[in-house]
Amino acid sequence: MTDWNNDNLLAAYRRMKTIREFEERLHLEIQQGQIAGFTHLYSGQEAVAVGVCEHLSDQDYIVSTHRGHGHCIAKGCDVIAMMKEIYGRADGLCKGKGGSMHIADFDKGMLGANAIVGGGPPLAVGAAIAARNAGERHVSVAFGGDGSCNQGTVFEAMNLAVVLQLPTIFVFEDNGYSEHTGADYAVGSKDIAGRCAGFGMPAERVDGDDFFAVHAAMQKALDHARAGNGPYALECTTTRFFGHFEGDPQRYRAKDEVERHREDRDCLKNFRQRVTDEGWLDEAELDAVDAEVLALIDDAVAQAQAAPPPSVDELTTDVYIAY
Amino acid sequence: MTDWNNDNLLAAYRRMKTIREFEERLHLEIQQGQIAGFTHLYSGQEAVAVGVCEHLSDQDYIVSTHRGHGHCIAKGCDVIAMMKEIYGRADGLCKGKGGSMHIADFDKGMLGANAIVGGGPPLAVGAAIAARNAGERHVSVAFGGDGSCNQGTVFEAMNLAVVLQLPTIFVFEDNGYSEHTGADYAVGSKDIAGRCAGFGMPAERVDGDDFFAVHAAMQKALDHARAGNGPYALECTTTRFFGHFEGDPQRYRAKDEVERHREDRDCLKNFRQRVTDEGWLDEAELDAVDAEVLALIDDAVAQAQAAPPPSVDELTTDVYIAY
Amino acid sequence: MTETTFRQALNDAMFEEMRRDERVIILGEDVSGGAGGTSGERDASGGIFGVSKGLIFEFGEDRVIDTPISESAIIGAGAGAALAGLRPISEIMFADFVGVCMDQIYNQAAKFRYMFGGKTRCPLVIRTAMGAGMNMGAQHSQTIYPILTGVPGLKVVVPSNAADAKGLLKTAIRDDDPVVFFEHKALYNRKCEVPDGEHLVPFGEAAMPREGDDCTVVAMGRMVVFAEKAIDGLAASGITCDLIDPRTLSPLDTDTIFESLEHTGRLVIVDESPPRCSVASDIAGIVASEAFGSLRAPIKLVTAPHAPVPFARELERAYMPGPGDIAAAIQDVCNG
Amino acid sequence: MTETTFRQALNDAMFEEMRRDERVIILGEDVSGGAGGTSGERDASGGIFGVSKGLIFEFGEDRVIDTPISESAIIGAGAGAALAGLRPISEIMFADFVGVCMDQIYNQAAKFRYMFGGKTRCPLVIRTAMGAGMNMGAQHSQTIYPILTGVPGLKVVVPSNAADAKGLLKTAIRDDDPVVFFEHKALYNRKCEVPDGEHLVPFGEAAMPREGDDCTVVAMGRMVVFAEKAIDGLAASGITCDLIDPRTLSPLDTDTIFESLEHTGRLVIVDESPPRCSVASDIAGIVASEAFGSLRAPIKLVTAPHAPVPFARELERAYMPGPGDIAAAIQDVCNG
Ligand SMILES: Cc1ncc(C[n+]2csc(CCOP(=O)(O)OP(=O)(O)O)c2C)c(N)n1
Ligand SMILES: Cc1ncc(C[n+]2csc(CCOP(=O)(O)OP(=O)(O)O)c2C)c(N)n1
Ligand SMILES: [Mg+2]
Ligand SMILES: [Mg+2]
């Protein structure tokens, strides 16, 4: 059990709030045509990324998805460099070559967002082999959605991690939908954790709207993996506050669903409630963080808008190290 | 429950015996260099193919594996045309173009052996869509080994069959090995049926050396699938009497394992024992079948050896129907 | 004739063929959409690009099948259903995703007829969206038709306009061999006149949207649009070209290319893919071996660079061959 | 120099590199074998073709990893381990199986460095057995290197003899980019003199096992052996050829080809793959665009037909290009 104090509580809140404001702001920027391409926002799911990643060091690895901004921020990627990447700027985190779906930061153990559903988990298993062979009890985490867990590559990764008893934690974020299809339709068993258990690893379902629940479950998963007992799976039920991608009319969702969830299932509200009820933090401390985060995001957007695009000479660099 | 009589018992025995003698004879022919390529023999597993396929009509579909001879014979493929195919003859079942790993017979609902592990199950799901849309309560069966169930395509097929509630029966033959690796190593959960259940379908483990056990379990699976309740999985524990492929030194197996299994786990012996103990058939009836089968196999080999190879003009035919 | 978008022409083709033959089904992710959603609304998607809109209402869930994210199962189920007598259309949302289902395409569907000695058919159509131009990044922007054009047993279709899109898709659905049908994302909203009533375009017959004397230009998919721009722009400077749109890359109409070359003696090939083992170098190789005598100048290949598709607008624009690159290449071979 | 089989040379290369650098690991199906078996014997397989024999005893289970039949996980785990600092060798038993793991090869490993702005490296080697000639049928006999040669970010190696196999595999393992290494099944037992001690063969440098004046022959993998036979057979008739073995298809040493062509003016390209979008047509296309001036005759392409690999001995023999086909092609271009 973590003993919570001002520092770690404010740090966690700051991360969640940073993700939230990053995404809410992107939503506006995209509406104004500022940003090109295909963007999937993480708003609503912050408690999962942060509840998991607050446990990790830069030597622990994560692999992410097409909806990766939250995982990147939670793992410590520089917010300004991320914003520049999404704007396609020369000094973006990946020189503007990757974009929203391909942000990575190897110094932070962030092995990349991935635009192929199911592309990440096999990579996480490999990172776990490296961690195991290094012998320093580091772990890898594979983030995926409810839809991703229908991709064969994900099952292969889970089985291999069990066979080799590797320290990989599979985190499935069930936000209810894969694109425009409901999770209860596409996941035949309607039970992601149950499937993972079928592969021979402990698996549990967690309230993904509750930071403290995710954080506690991740602690158990880590203890298990770090002790050399093999992989562990978490199914985190959560919700997304925007469409699948920006521009999605969301005709598959009940009219008031998002509104209702923003009201009842907002992990930031839940956090604020809990920490103030417990008397761990007061509103003023939290409001101060909010203000700082808003300033940071404003700055990130301003810098991203002002930053120069990559030079066309960059078109054919970085294909190989040597060719 | 089937009520057993001379006819259906002798028919089942004849099939199993035909598979056994077909394979035992191939083993010799291959040792004598008569047959080219890569051959995987089914000896020892006959009770599975026959226990399953005795329930099926030509309108029910099966998909098979690299170890497909038994499934072909059980589904009613012509033994002489099969032998010719394995010899690579012009009038083989597939004109000598397919060979041991690519035997199919569409008139019999046999949609093909498959040299890609995990290649078949997605096809079976598609055949089940056709069966469902035809509305005549036919089913499809996907055969696979213990090793095949680690291939992502197989998991995808199982989930899709559950999602669409299709009449597909997944039959996993656990003969203890995938090539030179033990099933208990490669199947992390050490429980194939449990995994299938995790996908949301009823699944049960059956003694694959016992024809009657397989036959009874298949009856339950069929009743379930034909009633429109979706897929069903059977894990049949069995053993192979030869190496993974012909020429395999089997250094991964205990010296006497095969010998012991031929002694204690021979599904044909088990069948003979059971039907004579029950007084359903007498030895003479069974011996008569043995003699007929041996004659058939002799004839098949003689015809295959005498048959002409395909003409070189066939090299580029059958690539397309029209091009 | 009715002016129709590329998207609508494809949608019309599927409606017509699904009405004509009840064995035609479609399966893929969100081909209808809304299954398991909280609004209860079906067809909430109609295909992520809207190409299969409305099909579910007329043909129902047994023929318009939403699937999980399981491309190997989408192709495999299509191929298996084809072996069992249906005529499925399996949709792979983005062509880049063939990587997760390649085996079912190239070892299964493509090889069944041959491996099984001609005793079966696999009338499967694989529809998929390809191409760069929307800043979708390296894994959502590729034109991967070269790797499938090389596969014996497959037919490969790359329409460049709405009329061909309709006529070729109808032909694909009626074809008894497996067909991979590539739809360029940047063309979905483009309109052109589409013949009313039954419109079928045969495979293996190239179109020639421009005719001229100085150079033969072969282009496919969206590159046909750019080549037209380039060629029209050159008219002023007195250079005229034959523009050949193969429409199907397998089978490939080499006769039309060879005939044109006899007349022009010069060849420019435009392909949105990277250069190595591309359709551009393939056609160049075929010409260098079978129509060498007609060549009066080196063949010019206009392709993307040997690099993944970059994200940033400026880089992606530089990545794709454009009208300017094509015009320059034509001038090169004509004046060089 | 020691006479060594192709198989042994590869095994030696792995032993040397795994001793040299503990970050080198190998994973795949039965790379050791015997795990979970009843004999308790490890290395019961040593790789289905015996190429990884003995590694497990010296390097242990953490570095020699037997996997389930999960090729996407084999490649993906290799790629992920590479991102995390190891130098993995992922073995795909038969090249035909890339279909079930293509995404991890072409969308993941190949693209990481570019997508991530040059901020990482993926030093992954994918070893795989290819080729026809053992009657293994349509799904176990392909030479699928053309589809990977076209992928930016990958390097593609196709050795034709034991010495190159060793030197190229050692170079591949030390290379910081992802490399796909193709081993022709029919070459495993072939012997040749292999230099003793450290032997490295650089990428992008072709070998020229034969030199002559009348024709340039480019061949790869097992086709080099057949081309040598064909060329040696023609000596009597007074025809001599440069034989170029590119050794790596990506990068491709075009300079050596162009230089030779300046001298001979004639080109025959031999490739075991089917013709469309093959390496044969690719090289022909490159030559027709970049070295057209040197060509004095049509390029001849000697490839397999546009068909899957058949099973029957007689058909498979007819399927593969043989010394006779190559000799005929050379005579054609020289006398034609
Ligand atoms: C292999 C593959 N198939 C399909 C897609 C298209 N696609 C992108 S995201 C997505 C839905 C993913 O759903 P889920 O895993 O639940 O993640 P979420 O979007 O809900 O975060 C789909 C189908 C893809 N990118 N890759
Ligand atoms: C995709 C793929 N990977 C690997 C192989 C090589 N291979 C052929 S059979 C086999 C073992 C299969 O084991 P199992 O499924 O248990 O079937 P069994 O051989 O025991 O009948 C392997 C690894 C293959 N043919 N296809
Ligand atoms: Mg989701
Ligand atoms: Mg087995």
Image: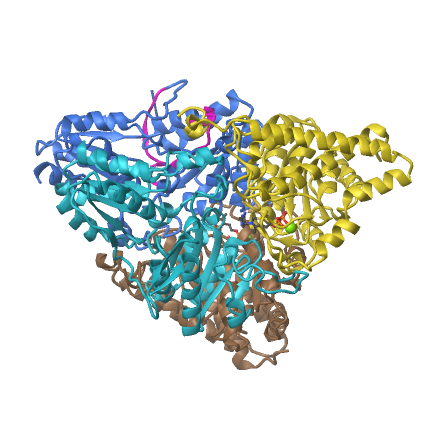
Chain colours: A brown, B yellow, C blue, D cyan
- Residue A224, above or below B226: below
- In front of the other: B176 or D162: D162
Percent across and percent down for residue A140 are 52, 68
Location of residue C237 by image quarter: top left
Q: Is residue B271 magenta?
A: no
Percent across and percent down for residue D165 are 37, 58
Residue at the spot 78% in from the left edge and 39% down from the top edge: B215
Q: Residue furthest front?
A: D236
Percent across and percent down for residue D296 are 14, 37
- Residue C190, above or below A71: above
Q: Which residues are magenta?
A: C172-195
- In front of the other: C39 or B232: B232
Q: Is residue D162 left or right of residue B140?
A: left
Residue at the spot 55% in from the left edge and 64% down from the top edge: A48
Q: Is residue B212 left or right of residue C230?
A: right
Q: Is residue C183 magenta?
A: yes
Image quadrant where one finds the C terminus of chain A:
bottom left
- In front of the other: A218 or A24: A218
- In front of the other: C105 or D91: D91
Image quadrant where one finds the N terminus of chain A:
bottom right
